[in-house]
Amino acid sequence: MPSSEKNFDKTLVKMGHCFGCHHDSCQIAFHIKDDKIVRVTQPWHSPIRSAPIVEGCPKARSFVEWNRHPDRLNFPLKRVGGRGENKWEKLSWDQALDEIANRLRQIKEESGPEYLTCIDGFSSEQWASQRFFHLFGSPNCEATMSRICKGDLRNIHFALLGRVALYGPPSERCNCLVAWGSAHSVSGTIMWAGEKRIKDLGGKLIVIDPRQTTEAKIADIWLQLRPGTDGAIAMGWLNIIINEELYDKEFVKNWTIGFPELKERVKKYTPKVVSEITSVPIDHIIESARMYAIIKPASINWGTKVSHIGPNATKVEQARCILRAITGNIDVDGGDRFQEPPPQLLSHQELDLAELLSEEQAKKALGWEYMKLKAWPGFKLINKALESAGKKRMPSWANFGALQAAIFDAIVTGKPYRPRAILLPGANPLILMAQTQKVYEALKCVEFSVGMDVWMTPSMLMCDYVLPGAYWLESPSIGWVERCEYILGGDRILPKKVEGVYDRADFYDFWRGLGIRLGQELYWPWKTTEENLEFRLKKLGVTWDEWRKQPWMIPPGVKDRTYLKDGRFPTPSGKVEIKSSILEQLGLDPLPDYQEPPESPVSTQELFKEYSLILITGARIRPFLHSQFRQISSTRRMHPDPLMEINPETAKESDLKDGDWVWIETKRGRAKQRCRIFEGIKPGVVHAEYGWWFPETKDPTTLFGAFECNINMVTSQEWDHLDKTCGNWYLNAMLCKIYKAQEPAAYYGKDLSASLVDDIPGEEGNGR
């Protein structure tokens, strides 16, 4: 296979992978000159489908602007003013890590290890944060978005199936695809290319979404449901499939337990009842259920939106998991195959050292009582079943830790104890967590805080120390794509340090640096990220030098129906547990069900009198990823303002026109966004974008505008709004009202050409 480096047009060209969509990993050719990216193009060779999309992707093209951007964090900083004042003293890495480690040692000795907490963000080696915390003795490290981004899915799949049956880059053998709560046309180029390919080959597409996405426009059936009623759709499908005997009778008989109890549970969810709950026509509900059950193989893809509906979140995924199983679409090509790390690659769970955290300390995890499946009790039961089946245990980063809402609540209230320190590596909770006000209060009053990021974000402004992180093109990595078709990764495309210009570090460097200062030397034998990656590649018989020149590998093909070879599923019963014994042992309902959202025209009728619209939030914005890319001139000019969408009918009732600035208000607060009238959204529903802050203001007194347009000012992490199985917070299907703002957003009217740095000059034809 050709080398990953070539010389074209007097530039060094390196092959790398883009994490601009986070889960998709398109391969890109980066043209390097004088340690700067001057151009990005599609690769000249790649095993990854859809690579030609790269040159049309705004995020991929924007990497020309990242490395030497003047707003990048370049050196370690120590706060010398008040929190949020943006006054800093520059330090060396050794001095910064020495001071941070000394403070953490003091807190541990005086109060205990659990008084250190962490919200871990988009670091590429999350096993390292878990390793550090397990060695330190604290159970209070949590991946930033794991509650609402695959965390609930992973845990309920492990409980029911013993593995994760996850729809990854779609197989061309898929004949019926269900896009449920996802819009990969915006959020993932590889996924979207695969979905279009299925349609081109004559496959069917069912879309379940309150908004008319690009997918909905080409769907065979679009179920435009009332927001938050996904669980009723799932239970209705189960009712139809069971009553019409469209399920796989042989699989259900031989490989499941709990089917009779499920059959009884779904009786009340007739098409008529489900239609009344969801406002979807009866014939659409029946036709879509039959289409999914009859046209095989079929796949329900992964979309995060059903994880954002609070108390209903895990129950919806439980029902979808059962739908996959009883229709015979589990572990087949074109259906939903099991997701497991390739055995040739040393996995995160083999590195995180969760076994070194005692159960006594695990029980001190904040908020575990509110999420028993995605906490130490569920972790323990699931791993017992996996061990009995000879499987690797779960990775702790996605399935074990503290509840973020509980971390912030404990810092403010002191109940059950008051954490004294918080680490924020790659995390921006002020923008991305529900109920921004609570997060702000916690970051304002916590005794000690340390952040590490690529940019000075609103959350970093609240820290005592801020460390400059290397982003993915400055840090080497190894990963794997969820259908296990290939292992990917790559070398450093750009250096993490240029003498006198910047001195950034890998997230691995940060955790190892703290670890060796706190007595963990024996557990961090790899001096660099590259040494660790070479260790992880050992089973493959590949050296790091060989890998970085060929940054992908296709392992042996994945087989269909692996449970036939194993003779069992890795669950307590050895079968698919439609009625989950693990949930039952945790004191939770072992079967799926539907309940009304915490706020709705049905469940809170008095509140509905004042807040008479339904709010949904958080659809992806093509040029951005969560709160990232706001500093980049090319992406911001594509999408300069935060937008809220309403139907023309709703706009007329509220006397709003396209382009008006609008307040969106719930009983928790309000946020200001710009009106976009959109016929593809249901009357009475409002959609608001998320992730908005304004680095171009250069004004730290407002935390770069973190409070005005940030829709998480109105969302909820209140205890009675959380999912009781996995702890998901409440971002969608809540009640709101809207009204015209007297003034535009404070930042509005600023000249983006002056306030955002222009494109960094490159060679002619730099891929734009």
Image (cartoon, rainbow, N blue to C red):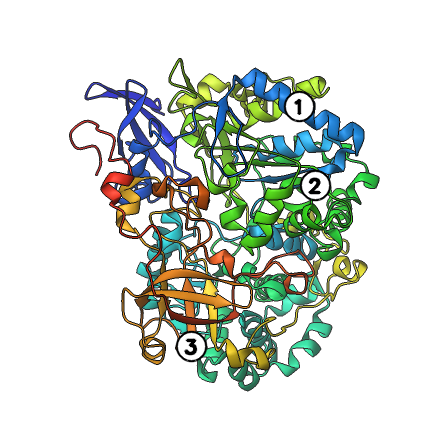
Residue 85 relative to residue 273: left or right: left
Q: CA distance from mark 3 to mark 1?
A: 52 Å
Element on which disc 1 rests: helix
Element on which disc 2 rests: loop
Residue 473 relative to residue 218: left or right: right
Residue 757 relative to residue 343: left or right: left
According to the image, label 1 marks what residue?
101
Q: Locate the N terminus by quadrant.
A: top left
Residue positioned most to the front:
81
According to the image, label 3 marks what residue?
684
Image x and y of residue 699, in percent = 40, 41
Image x and y of residue 520, in percent = 71, 21
Residue positioned most to the top:
499
Residue flagged by tag 2: what amino acid is it? Answer: Asn
- Marks 3/1 in contact by CB < 8 Å: the verdict is no
| Residue beneath the point at 58% across and 17% down | 95
According to the image, label 2 marks what residue?
140
Q: Residues within 10 Å of mark 1 (few under 14, many from 20)?
A: some
Between discs 3 and 1, the one toward the N terminus: 1
Q: Locate the C terminus by quadrant.
A: top left
Residue flagged by tag 3: what amino acid is it? Answer: Gly
**Above or below, comparing residue 135 to residue 693 in the picture:** above
- Mark in front: 2 vs 1: 1
Image x and y of residue 731, in percent = 53, 61
Element on which disc 3 rests: loop
> Which corner quadrant of the image does residue 759 belong to?
top left
Between discs 3 and 2, the one toward the N terminus: 2
**Above or below, comparing residue 679 to residue 393 in the picture:** below
